[in-house]
Amino acid sequence: MEIEPVYVAAPSAQARCWVSRRAFLTGVLGSLGLGSAMGAHLGSRSRVPPSSTTTETDAATVPFVEDCVAWADAPLEELASHAPLFLIVFGATEDPRLVPGLERLAAAVVARHPTVADQRATLAAALAAEIATRPAAHDALLTFLPALRAIR
């Protein structure tokens, strides 16, 4: 009986990972901590002070209010070109100086004015939503509500 030599292949060396689990976890936790601290710092600087019941405080905290007041009295073409921003600012401030602009926009949409023809359905839906959410503050606008809701 002859014994033949047996060669056992050694397992190949595993590729070494360039970062260990501990280093990865430390990096993730450090990033999370620094990110949340930075977010808390920046968030505290950009917070709006608590709003009071006066419109002047609200108007001072929202940008573009004075521009929107100017657009409320401007020609209809200019008001219609800035209508989305106008509606956003009105929704944020409920400034009574903007109500005449809303009335002019609603009247133009209902009357099918050519200036608002390309955005008529969008403006009608936005105006109807704006008027419906604040019915007590703007009684003059309630007359436009059924006609605005009928526009598709």
Image: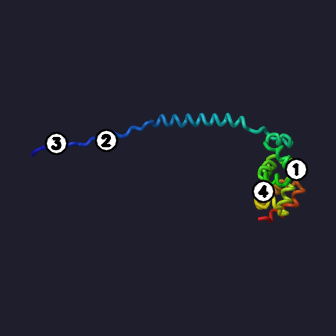
Indicate which disc, 1 or 2, sits on the residue closer to the N terminus.
2
Q: Is residue 137 visible?
A: no
Location of the C terminus (image quadrant): bottom right
Q: Nearer the viewer, mark 3 or mark 1?
A: 1
Q: CA distance from mark 4 to mark 1?
A: 20 Å
Few, some or many C-alpha atoms within 10 Å of disc 3 (few <14, some 14-19, many ≥20)?
Answer: few
Q: CA distance from mark 2 to mark 3?
A: 21 Å
**Residue 129 higher or lower than 67, as above or below:** below
Q: Which of these two is toward me, 145 or 63?
A: 63
Residue 21's x, y, as percent? 46, 37
Residue depicted at x 39% and y 37%: 16
Residue 70's x, y, as percent? 85, 46
Q: Is residue 152 visible?
A: yes
Query: For residue 73, which numbered disc appears in the image?
Result: 1
Determine whether the residue tagged by mark 4 lies in a helix, strand or loop. helix
Few, some or many C-alpha atoms within 10 Å of disc 4 (few <14, some 14-19, many ≥20)?
Answer: some
Q: Nearer the viewer, mark 1 or mark 2?
A: 1
Of the residues shown, which amino acid type is indicated by label 2?
A: Ser
- The answer to whether the residues at label 2 and label 3 have Cβ atoms under 8 Å apart is no
Query: For residue 12, which numbered disc appears in the image?
Result: 2
Give the residue number, with chain letter if any, for mark 4: 126
Of the residues shown, which amino acid type is indicated by label 1?
A: Asp
Query: For residue 5, which numbered disc appears in the image?
Result: 3
Residue 73's x, y, as percent? 88, 50
Q: Is residue 109 left or right of residue 7?
A: right
Of the residues shown, which amino acid type is indicated by label 3?
A: Pro
Determine whether the residue tagged by mark 2 lies in a helix, strand or loop. loop
Q: Which of these two is toward me, 40 or 78?
A: 78
Q: CA distance from mark 4 to mark 2?
A: 68 Å
